[in-house]
Image (spheres, helix red, strand yellow):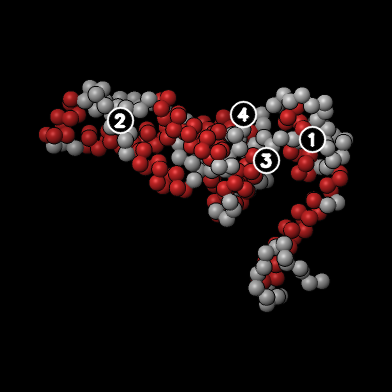
Amino acid sequence: FKAINTYAAPVIGYSFGIIRWSHTDIDELNRLNRTQLTRYRKLHPNSCIERITISRPEGGRGLVDFHTLYNSEIDNLRQYFHSKDTPLHRTITKADRRYTQLNLHEEHAQLERSHTITQKKEEWSRKTLHGKHYNIVQNPYIDQELTYKWLTMGQIYPETEGFILAIQDNVIATRNYRKFIIKEAIESDTCRKCHQTTENIDHITGSCKLLAGTDYTERHNAAAKIIHQELAHKHNLIQTKRVPYYTYLPDN
């Protein structure tokens, strides 16, 4: 993501205002980004599209939106030419009657609108599956900054990051998803473990009785080990170096 934003996007951005790009062309650039990320397993093909270009502190992945970049470059170039008072700049401004996408002759020409972050969030929240996670995070008792801190720290592989977001977007191939969303011809959407209720993300991550004594316990113990080790080091209760949580064994 950083490579795309830092190296690829600016190179393309240099052509905005010089080469004539259509709305469809820019849509294709955004689509190309998504397909390449999917190809290399960094993005689930059914993940929320709006979320990709929302900033990481707000729950997105911070990828450049070429529509936003295009409008920004066009606006900056127009302001530059209109702010100059040299004969050359005045001549260019007067002559550009839709010869370029800057259309400098019209001082207050309207730019093509792109979705703002607020509009993207609204679209994200309105989606039945994708919006479920977003609407939960908006609860006043949830700290959004801490919730999405892992997205800003850059400590996990992009493939893992994409998988976690796919879980949050409810697009993992559970039986419920396959039967009612993908419309696969399966007889039942009941859980393959407990065979008692619908198999969806919420059930798998927190309410399957057969997983309660194993996977859920291991998950809680792992979190407790991290907290225990941090507190022990903070209060100088142990002198050993920090070790990965999965090898840490708290003293009784």
Image location of residue 13, percent across then percent down: 35, 38
Q: Tag on residue 126?
A: 4
Residue extending furthest toward the top:
97
Q: Indicate which label's residue lies in the foreground, 3 or 2.
A: 2
On screen, residue 212 above or below 69: below
Residue extending furthest toward the left:
87
Query: How would you rate the neighbour count of disc 4 (Cα within 10 Å): few for under 14, some for 14-19, many for 20 or more?
Result: few
Residue at disc 1, secondary structure: loop
Q: Tag on residue 199?
A: 1
On screen, residue 185 above or below 56: above
Residue at disc 2, secondary structure: loop
- Residue 19 appearing in the image: yes
* Label tally: 4
* Residue occupying image coordinates x 45% and y 47%: 3
Q: Where, by quadrant of the figure, is residue 241 drawn?
A: bottom right
* Residue occupying image coordinates x 15% and y 36%: 85
Q: Mark 3 near mark 4, Cβ–Cβ under 8 Å?
A: no
Q: Tag on residue 19?
A: 2
Label 4 vs label 1: CA separation?
23 Å
**Amino acid type of the residue that numbered disc 3 sits on in the rendered structure:** Ile
Q: Earlier in the sequence, mark 2 or mark 1?
A: 2
Label 3 vs label 4: CA separation?
18 Å
Left or right, residue 219 beside residue 88: right
Q: Tag on residue 111?
A: none
Residue at disc 3, secondary structure: helix
Image location of residue 213, percent across then percent down: 86, 51
Q: Earlier in the sequence, mark 3 or mark 4?
A: 4
